Amino acid sequence: MLYTALLPKWWFKVQLTHAPPEKQPQRGGRTLGEQLKAVCPTIADPAKAYYIPSWVMPGGDMQTIYLYTQHFKPAGCPVSYERDIFEFSDGGKAAIDWARPRRDSLPESPLIILVPGIAGGSHDYYARSFIHRISQQPYGYQVVVLHSRGCNGVDLHTPKAFHAGMTDDLREFVKHLAERRPKSRLIGIGFSLGANILTKYVGEEGASCRFVAAASVCNPFDIDTTVRAMCAPTIKNRFLYAAALTRSLISVFTSNQKVILAGEVALDAKRIVSARNINEFNEEYTIKVFGYQSAKELNVGGSCVHYLKDIQVPMLFINALDDPMCYRRTIPFDDIAKNPHLVLACTRYGGHLAYFEGTSVTPWLPSQLSSFVESMLTWK
């Protein structure tokens, strides 16, 4: 393990990937890159953009595991939510958590839509730490968290839960918000699996996208490659990351087993709960209820990497090269550089959604995402 305190500062520079300045969109005399450099210097100004991990836990594994322990400590970043239940057109329901102030008191203010990771939600530390920061001055923006079906206290009402490329629920929710708050500027932020879903949605929408900007954090990009790597019989997969993700999926099934098995598709509950990895779970449950022929078809079709070329709103991607769940080899550097609307910020360290820094082990991401939101809302 590297002892980060002994490494030169240049080692920790944030590496940016984007199109040449002359091809980037421009507003008010500034290109996208210039706007980010001016308002988000700690992520986009080469002279100021560094991420130095806490020397207490510099490695990606330690950071990721520590992040998980913080999910159960709300005192560190207290956030007060107001919950709604959103009903989709097919009868399905999902939990919607609004971070105060109440949405009704700010009908014209900007609104940030947060899409969490697999079976995650508003209680997760990466979400709370960002919301805690963005809701305070000088920002004071409101955030709403869209949870996946069957998660966070809301049971399934249809046999379908979710999968990595499922964008219909996000599309319907965003449409609902845009119609209810037509004067609000919307910004989407996705984390992990939610980042893939958000990115795929923004690409599918193209020029019709209702977001003025979006951000992706720790995006797997290529779901098939990522899942295949997680299905490899390694110690980490058996006892840490892949095992935890598989348990999360099985938990959603067992909590909603009665509704799922009452559907028209024949399922084998014993085989589903006995799944040893994500692909086995998808083969026994997901592909059957969503109408795919194989887990590979599901994974390939659900990968946002195929939609990067179609994105037409400013979008920031943040990925750590030591992320133990979203691998370096899946980061599409060339595809991002070809689209003038996209900017990729890569760090050497940070783990998966963790990015802790300093001796006090505080999160680095909230400030970066908050300044990105500010930069997009002030870029006119």
Image (cartoon, rainbow, N blue to C red):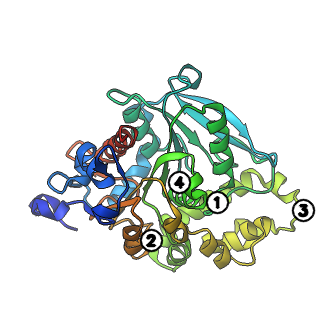
> Which amino acid, mark 4?
Gly
- Which residue position holds label 1? 249
Q: Earlier in the sequence, mark 3 or mark 2?
A: 2
- Which residue position holds label 2? 236
> Which amino acid, mark 3?
Glu
- Which residue position holds label 4? 117
Q: Which of the image's four quarters has the C terminus?
A: top left
Label 4–label 1 contact, CB within 8 A:
no
Q: Earlier in the sequence, mark 2 or mark 1?
A: 2
Q: What secondary structure is marked by label 4?
A: loop
> Which amino acid, mark 1?
Leu
Q: Position of residue 98 (x, y in %)?
A: 56, 32
> Which amino acid, mark 2?
Lys
Q: Earlier in the sequence, mark 4 or mark 2?
A: 4
Q: Position of residue 318 (x, y in %)?
A: 37, 58
Q: Is residue 24 above or below residue 79?
A: below
Q: Is residue 27 left or right of residue 348?
A: right
